[in-house]
Amino acid sequence: MGGVRESRILIVGLGLIGGSLAAALRAAGYGLENRPGEIVACDPDAGEIALGIEMGLIDGGDTRLAPLVEGASLIVLAVPVLAMESVMVELAGVLPGGSLDGTAPGVVVTDVGSTKAAIRDCALRAFGRLPAGLVLGHPIAGSEKSGVVASNPRLYANHKVILTPVPETAPAAVDRVRALWRACRAEILEMEVERHDQVLARTSHLPHLLAFSLVDTLARQDERLDIFRYAAGGFRDFTRIAGSDPVMWRDIFIANRDAVLASLDDFEAGVSRLRQAVEAGDGDAMLAIFDRASHARHYFDSLLNQTSYQAEYQMQQQGRLTFLASPGGRVAGRIRVPGDKSISHRSIMLGALAEGVTEVKGFLEGEDSLATLQAFREMGVAIEGPHQGRVIVHGVGMHGLKAPSGPLYVGNAGTAMRLFAGLLAGQAFDTELIGDASLTKRPMGRVADPLRLMGAVIDTAEGGRPPLKIRGGQRLKGIDYDMPMASAQVKSCLLLAGLYADGETRVREPAPTRDHTERMLAGFGYEVHRKGDTCWLEGGGTLAAAPIDVPSDISSATFFLVAAAITPGSNLVLEHVGINPTRIGVINVLKLMGADLWLVNEHEVGGEPVADLHIRYAPLHGIDIPEDQVPLAIDEFPALFIAAASAIGTTRLRGAEELRVKESDRIQAMADGLAAIGVEHTVLEDGIDIVGAGEREVAYGGGRIDSLGDHRIAMAFVIASLRAGDEIIIDDCANVATSFPGFTALARTVGLKVREETDEVAP
Ligand code: S3P
């Protein structure tokens, strides 16, 4: 029975919450089959006690508290909030002096109340101080059902329990309460008392208040309750919680009065904005509100599940996503791939910090950039859209961001996390950045270390991994930084921090990396200097909003460039692709391999060069990829490996160790995939040798590939099917939506034979 070492647990109040706690402890084996441990309960209703015993939840109980306290090592107060004080007064009377001192053999008392400040104040009055052995807590779980009869052993599983220790609380006591909830399979968080109450007022108390009020209002209007007969699913979903225990909720609203009133004020302001829009028939305003809400709701789901935003959404709708690519097919047509991911991220970041309104066209509606967009909404920035790539960002100025109410979840997006780190290091408030399982394994020391040199206060998990906890209110100073690796994310992170720093922030890069941040800053009227391999800016300036036209992403176009390059008979045009000189490694490498590829209609949009890319099939030849092209094609290697596997002769890549710390270890993930379809290769620490198929029409076989949730690995093996002898099945593809929503549909329009399949996941 895990880490619960209590000899006797006393639950005061055997309702749904207390009963479910007993049920969960029993389900975990506590006190069962000769294992030590006893559960007893106190409840004013003798019937509830009898039922608890009959259900096997408790070993005994009483309607009086005093006889049960002796011998109890852990006491859980699960009574209504307003009954807490009298119970605590009684406890203070019967607990022997000093027994709540928080030391190991002492008694620990915890509670499950939905508000914390009021209960802390009760404790202060009852005990005359805050005892070290008192650990206030709140399981965020419940049901509209009540009574011990509704006890559910899984009520707390995968739900959050917030503990709110105060400075007086003994860490050993907190550990014992943690062990209790761990046994119930809950996720445990700690928070300050006041913050808990504010957060709960908004996320729980306000929705309950609205549900009670709506149902009551409708019920009053229709005494015979006729309309409820016609109520549809929306009514049922919205009002389910109005069936909750009235006494409990009365108590909560009395106890958390101030925080509830503050959240009600915000709500009333929101409703009146919406009312005005409805009154005026202002469709745009309504759309902006609904859109923001709808995105926030999807984002909320992913936050709860800690999986990627769009991927989570898709999983919910569809289950796990597999791509099945049949061999052969052709590549012809004229297409436009979605907007550039790097530029999309930056458009929201700089738009938010600017003075004025930034209108973005061509924004990538992929999970990564949507996570950035959502994070700024969480920091109080009004953002309309996206609608067909159009986003309107209402800038708040350099110092206008507000503290988010919780951690900022950026899903799979390394760019978001690293650039945010710089930007948030300069804010007045604290933030925490979290990501999905893949991002949580990626190195953040590369940004945290230089930011600390600038005076930022940042905590990371072990090995410099996420989450990143960033302390606000620091005075940053400019530094002169020699980057140990060629990384645009590190450079951009430092430049963004540099906006908030005293003096100049200078970054030297060992090789040129994408310069979208510098270009966009300049477009927003912020002076950025460059000389040779170093760029720098002076902190303290402002940004002026400017329109942004996001070109199509050359990294997404790459999959189709390679598709055409390896498939006899192909002829393809990719429109409006960004050809920033720091991004065109893939064009240079394909040309060196012999690709028949040329640019037409070259022009500039908002400081970024674009062109239509025209490609026709020509046999490719293996090459030694020039090392200076590596940073310029860093995201394109999964697809280039497929080009190499389809070429005549061997292709050698060196100096590409950075590929090992992308969304997956891309050298190994691609090598494993190549092995699965029978492509000969040798893996090196910093690269790979790939033996091409030569003149063979069928270059390799089929097989099953694990994309490891890496979007670019998944898309690369879809392209490989064009020269495969058999079907290629690629698992774990939902993250393709991070950078390329609609990839398979677009692939089919040019002639690939790929379909999607989902296996239903258990709810
Ligand atoms: C990016 C920079 C690159 C790239 C990533 C996007 C950016 O990462 O791989 O997909 O937008 O700045 P590194 O800076 O780690 O090379």
Image (cartoon, rainbow, N blue to C red):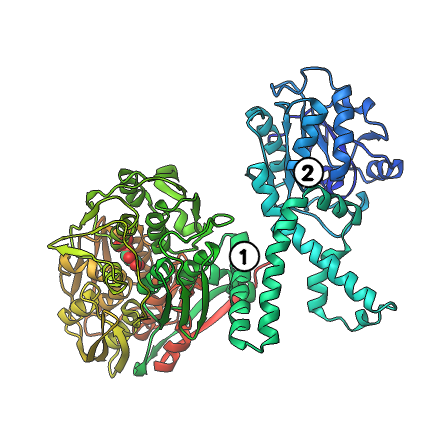
Q: Which residue is mark 1?
A: 300
Q: Nearer the viewer, residue 166 or 30?
A: 166
Residue drawn at 21 percent across, 42 percent down: 479
* Vertical position of residue 26 compared to residue 516: above or below: above
Identity, as a three-letter code, of the amino acid under mark 1 = Phe
Residue 319 in the image: state x and y as whole percent. Answer: 54, 63
Query: From this viewpoint, is residue 70 visible?
Result: no
In the image, residue 21 sits, relative to residue 662, either above or below, namely above
Tell me the element at label 1: helix
308 left or right, relative to 509? right
Q: Residue at point 71% right, 67% down?
A: 235
Q: Quadrant of residue 446?
A: top left
Question: Could you say which is closer to the camera, residue 377 or residue 238?
Answer: 377
Q: Position of residue 500 (x, y in %)?
A: 30, 48
Which corner quadrant holds the C terminus?
A: bottom right
Badge 1: residue crowd in 10 Å (few <14, some 14–19, many ≥20): some
In x, y percent, where is residue 415? Answer: 34, 55
Question: In the displayed structure, does residue 420 sit left or right of residue 259?
Answer: left
Left or right: residue 60 versus residue 286 is right
Using a 10 Å C-alpha cutoff, classify the residue at mark 2 as few (fewer than 14 neighbours), some (14 to 19) or many (20 or more): many
